[in-house]
Image: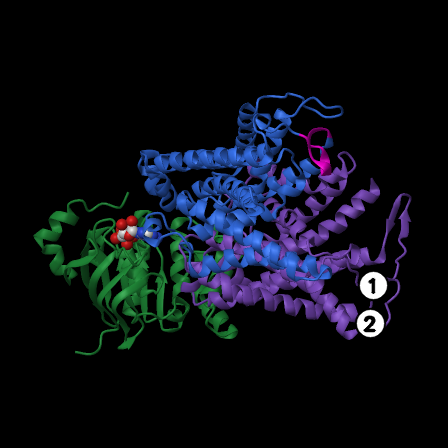
Amino acid sequence: MSGFAAYLVFFLIVALTYSIVTMGLNLQWGYTGLFNAGVVGFFAIGAYGTAVLVGPDRAQLIGGFALPFPVAVVGGMALAALAALVVGLATLKLREEYLAIATFGIAISIQLVALNFEALTGGVNGLVGLPRPLFTAFGSPGAYNLFYLAVVASVALLVYVALEVAVRSPWGRVLKAVREDETAARSLGKNPAAIRLQVFVLGCTLMGLAGGLYVGFIGYVSPLDFLPILTFQIWAMLIVGGSGNNLGAIVGAVGVWALWTMSGLGVSRLLPVAYQSQGGAIQVIIIGLLIVLTLLFRPRGLIGEAEAVSRHAR
Amino acid sequence: MLQALADGILSGSIIALGAIGLTLTMGILRFANFAHAELVTWGAYMALAVLAVTGTFMGPIAPLSFGIPLILAIVVAAALTSLLALAIDWLVYRPLRRQTNHLTLVFGSFGISLLVRMVILLIFGGAAQYYSTALQIAIPVAPGLRIMPDQLFTLAVTVVIVVALHFFLQKTRLGLAMRALAENPELARVNGIDTRAVVRWTWVIGASLAAVAGVLYGLTIQLRPEIGFHLILPLFAAVILGGVGNVFGAVIGGLVIGLAESLAVLVVPSGYKMAVPFLILLAVLYLRPTGIFAGTVGGVK
Amino acid sequence: MSTPLLEVEDVVAGYRPDLPIVQGITLKVAEAEMVTIIGPNGAGKSTLIKAVAGIVQVSSGRVRLAGAEITRLPTHRLAQAAIAYVPQTANVFTTLTIDENLLVGASTLAKGEARRRMDRSYENFPVLKEYRQKKAKVLSGGQRQMLAVARALLTEPRLLMLDEPSAGLSPLMVSEVFQRLKALVEGGVAILMVEQNAKAALAISHRTYVFAEGRNRIDGPSAALAQDPQVASIYLGAGGRKR
Ligand SMILES: Nc1ncnc2c1ncn2[C@@H]1O[C@H](COP(=O)(O)OP(=O)(O)O)[C@@H](O)[C@H]1O
Ligand SMILES: [Mg+2]
């Protein structure tokens, strides 16, 4: 494989992994109006959970479960769901912004645990040398990456189809009612708080799933992959694609990740070394502008087809 | 132990200043402003910029590490921070307020917090900076307790501001209008209160307090672009603990958070310090979502 | 005929642009006239009053006060334009003291004038004077209604709009409130009032409008409507109070 093709495969694996996170966020915000300000935290829990469960026995580290990869991923998802339950139960009966604040808080706390609980997470070094599923079955890293792309793409497709079915089901139709008219939802005999909790936990579980897939691909976890900026990136992916639109979430994830990657490339190529940190700031400013300007001028998204979205548009 | 208490009260008083502004804006504008803590950073850096322009044309007032130039810088920084807050309100929040879903405002503030932080990084760089390189000698006041004069100054400023704000809210017409607006915006308008004007003043007061908090913070620690980001959680926790919209509650909330952070380090590794506000927040939400002192905007829907 | 004090002309209004609640209502209130609006729950009575008060968006039609158009005037300007409005619920600031509630009502006045008028309303409403330093949340429903009316009157409005002032009050309280409103009208203030109790509404007012489904169906002098079999069968039979 040529260098560019190999890079493209690598790029798509990461972008599609993020698209699963974005779809999870879309379920929460796009369909139900729940503001999750700690996306990275749930992604990280899925990743670290998977890493600990899949990891071999190692001196000075808790774990050594060496579970099969799919089982470990499910474990990571369960941990993400549990974290979601803790913040969800505390906040979903309260004013909406309390969920935003609490999710922000849990993401910070998870980052602290990742950095400081060395016996479990490996601290700043992270956990390295994790087994990658079926890695030995492939002759070359290139072939393996192609295989992994197929896996991630299939999971993303599965999540997409499942969500499309779910939001069209009777359960899915209640979401809009919950979001737009609490009283109406209640008069339909639905308990809005319970539905919010279901949606929130489900969305976070998807974020955990993506975290597990991410670890399976890169073969290690490091706190550097779970910085707060990721939350903003995922939000940019969602709003660019048009919230309430699962296809838009995928397109947005790929598009924004491409923009991020290319702007990073541009910064490292064009700016002198002395200005690299400022260049990083410009990269992040692009993300911030994407969020704020889309919110102001194209609240239905840049890519999302207005017609398709309008049914859910806020 | 004694030292931890003193440090906790000090950082608590800075959190309190930030939290007062946040609780006012949350009570009156009715949304969780994620960008408020960035006003603290902005204020701190604006003072730095003012000092860079004016130079320290007068020496420090002993035993403090600073003098008239910094006090002047605080005033200018407060004005510049108010301008930023008004500009953001006009450009971003005002259009977003028209949308029916008020969480869009929260979303907007989330994006703005990132932008402000990065603009500061872009302008001032990421390295730590100081108002003054002069070393200050901590004065031993009791066995095991040393306090720096700057810290006492910080505490004194906080007390003065809290008292002044209390009188402002209780005794002036604008203060009354703010309290009326916090409880019932529609009724306030019906009574002839121009709520847009009150909102503007709310920003000015909240931003000015944030700027003062930022400069005081910068006196006691290094100035970095991420100080605001690290304050988001403590500020929200203080506000919710004290009851949203309750100025007095925000002060107590700030002190509690500051003390808890500082005392927690005695029992858990200091790396976890930043999780303390989250745990307090979670406990409040589970046990008493209206806060210790009920706010004007209840936590329960 | 002289210009009516309030003219509502074919007003369409609602909480969302795509969902008009008030669907073309026309009504008039003359100087020193008491007009009531009755109609079933959800007919749009409160919404119409809010539209006049500038709280609810008017999408078409006109509102005039003494001939001057006030349709899209911001709410806070209406207090200066001599319209006062007492909402049905949450009509006092419970976290403020009685005195502060009145002071808010006097927002548009100079300080000295505000104080003078507040002293006068304490004379008119002795209950309020007794509690003036207490938070309004300690007041009973009837006392709150008194406070709300007293506060609305501070600006000496020409038109006072009230939304179900009798809701939830004891019969004794209701008659006291109504006596006071009557006295106001005799003193030259026009009143536009939504009233759930149709019998009481027809008895007290000069004219009545009957709303249904966002439109005004029937209107006329109250005395005549009280005899109207159609009105009688719909409203006076039930006669009772809302929930
Ligand atoms: N704040 C509001 N937002 C959206 N719809 C409302 C609101 N208030 C009232 N409505 C709707 O407007 C209609 C008319 O309400 P309203 O004017 O209060 O009726 P009335 O006062 O005649 O009982 C009702 O269907 C009600 O559901
Ligand atoms: Mg009504």
Query: Residue C84 in the image: x percent, y percent?
Result: 36, 66
The boundaries of the magenta stretch are: A119-129
Colour of the chain lettered C:
green
Q: Distance of mark 1 from mark 2, alpha carbons?
A: 9 Å
Amino acid type of disc 2?
A: Thr
Relative height, residue C22 to residue B67 (above, below): above
x 67%, y 40%: residue: A223
Residue displayed at 27% across by 46% down: C242
User: Which residue position holds label 1?
Assistant: B132
**Parent chain of label 1:** B
Asked if ligand 1 lies within 8 A of label 2, the reply is no
Q: Residue furthest front?
A: A1
Give the position of the N terminus of chain B as an image quadrant: top right
Graded by Cα atoms within 10 Å as few (under 14), some (14 to 19) or many (20 or more), the crowding at tag 1 reads: some
Whether residue B72 can be seen here: no
Along the line of sight, which residue is nearer the eye, A141 or B73?
A: A141
Kind of residue sitting beneath label 1:
Ser
Please, is residue C213 above or below residue A205 in the view? Answer: below
Chain painted in purple in the figure = B
A198 falls in the magenta region: no
Location of residue C41 in the rendering, given as x and y in whole percent from the top left corner: 24, 48
Q: With respect to residue B3, does C110 lie above or below? A: below
Q: Position of residue A117 (x, y in %)?
A: 71, 33
Q: Is residue C188 left or right of residue A245?
A: left
The answer to whether residue C140 shows anywhere in this view is yes
Mark 1 near mark 2, Cβ–Cβ under 8 Å?
yes
* Secondary structure found at label 1: loop
- Of residue B287 and residue C84, the one placed in the foreground of this image is B287
Q: Colour of chain A?
A: blue
On the image, numbered disc 2 is attached to which residue? B56
Which image quarter: residue C18?
Answer: bottom left
Q: Chain of mark 2?
A: B
